[in-house]
Image (spheres, rainbow, N blue to C red):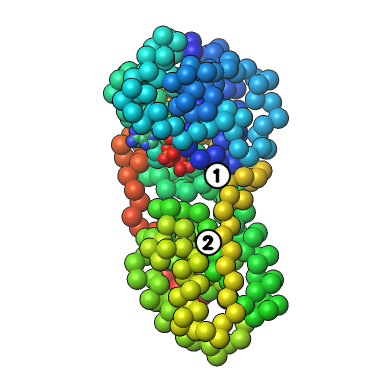
Amino acid sequence: MKKIGVLTSGGDSPGMNACLRAVVRTAVHHNIEVLGFLRGYEGVIDNKYNILTTTSVSGIIQRGGTILKTARSERFRTDEGVKTAAKNLKELKLDGLVIIGGDGSFRGAIELSKHYNIPIVGCAGTIDNDLVGTDFTIGYDTAINTVVEALDKIRDTAESHDRVFVIEVMGRDAGLIALRSAIASGAEGLLVPELKRDVNSLLDKIKNWRTSKSSKIVVVAEGDESGGAYKVADLIKANCPEFDIRVTVLGHIQRGGNPTCMERVNASLLGYNAVTALLGGHKNEMIGIIDKKIIYTPFEKAVKHIEELNPDLVKMMEVLSS
Ligand code: ATP
């Protein structure tokens, strides 16, 4: 193996740089040249890349975002875009490709491999933690810690004014950020796409809140069927007009920031193992960590939507928030 490519794709997530650094330094250790494509699949289509060395990835382990930049490439969703990318990779004579991204990025990898049989391995880089085959994805730990920090601050105001706060967190399809951060911040309510009829349960529950005049926090995943924090706030107001309700949409602060220690170590492990996986003949698989062991999951399986949240955590949340 002489030359590999690497790219970051989809939404940026803290820890992508730590993963990239590990990919580059492991490859260099094995005398493999590394081409870093810029702006995800856009860079592959446009043949825009930098040759990455040990020094190119100096001083980035602690930085959020991605020095390679990333993109949601509409062109790569077209047949023409994938064919151009495949042609470029063939001409560059790459022996392998490491993709750091989320489920969409791995769907893209599946399409790419239909046109060019280059060994591809993936490192799950998304704050959503919504991939099958790994206990965590790069960015998730930092994101939930960012959310919890914000919720703690909001709690101070909620308590001081006896207010109800409805907080919207990221998660278009998955409620994992919402669930963990709700538990960790002692939230009183949780609305996530995986749990149906949770709005009805919340409305039942808030009737009891009338008797206790104190702060309440409801965490809503953006993809919940209730339609988001503003709609939930309207619903609560309609049922309990006496409540002083405020809404906060946390938005993009959830993506950035310095990765946590756990994030940096796990992202490094994934990047390191991505290169050793390519050297070991793996292809079209995502590298994950389950119970502290490195696990290889075919892309087709990794991108399957996780329909269910951990029932033990959901039950515990119900009990502890009652
Ligand atoms: P995040 O979890 O942060 O959203 P992601 O990798 O899921 O990350 P997407 O925008 O869904 O982010 O996907 C990244 C890119 O992968 C897309 O912009 C597109 O270029 C490519 N992609 C996604 N789905 C497909 C597909 N079905 N076919 C080809 N390319 C795809």
Is 209 located above or below residue 186 in the figure?
below
The earlier-in-sequence mark between 2 and 1 is 1
- Which quarter of the rendered image does ligand 1 occupy? top left
Is 156 located above or below residue 240 in the figure?
above
Residue 182: in sight, yes or no?
no
Residue 199: in sight, yes or no?
yes
User: Given the image, on which type of amino acid does mark 1 rest?
Assistant: Gly
Q: Position of residue 44 (x, y in %)?
A: 46, 21
Picture quadrant where residue 74 is located: top left
Quadrant where the N terminus sits is: top left
Left or right? Give the position of 250 relative to 313: right
User: Given the image, on which type of amino acid does mark 2 rest?
Assistant: Glu
Q: Secondary structure at mark 2?
A: strand
Q: Are marks 2 and 1 in contact (CB under 8 Å)?
A: no
Does mark 1's beta carbon lie closer than 8 Å to ligand 1? yes
Residue at 45% across / 10% down in the picture? Answer: 92
Q: Position of residue 34 (x, y in %)?
A: 54, 17
Mark 2 Cα shell of 10 Å, populated few (<14), some (14-19), many (≥20): many
| Residue reaching furthest to the left | 114
Q: Position of residue 161 (x, y in %)?
A: 68, 79
- Check disc 1 and report the residue beneath it: 139
Left or right? Give the position of 165 relative to 43: right
Residue at 53% across / 13% down in the picture? Answer: 32
Left or right? Give the position of 69 relative to 134: right
Q: Position of residue 96 (x, y in %)?
A: 43, 19
Mark 1 Cα shell of 10 Å, populated few (<14), some (14-19), many (≥20): many
Q: Of residues 198 and 119, which is closer to you in this image?
A: 198
Picture quadrant where residue 278 is located: top left
The residues tagged by marks 2 and 1 sit, at their Cα atoms, a distance apart of 18 Å
- Check disc 2 and report the residue beneath it: 168
Picture quadrant where residue 250 is located: bottom right
Residue at 44% across / 66% down in the picture? Answer: 191
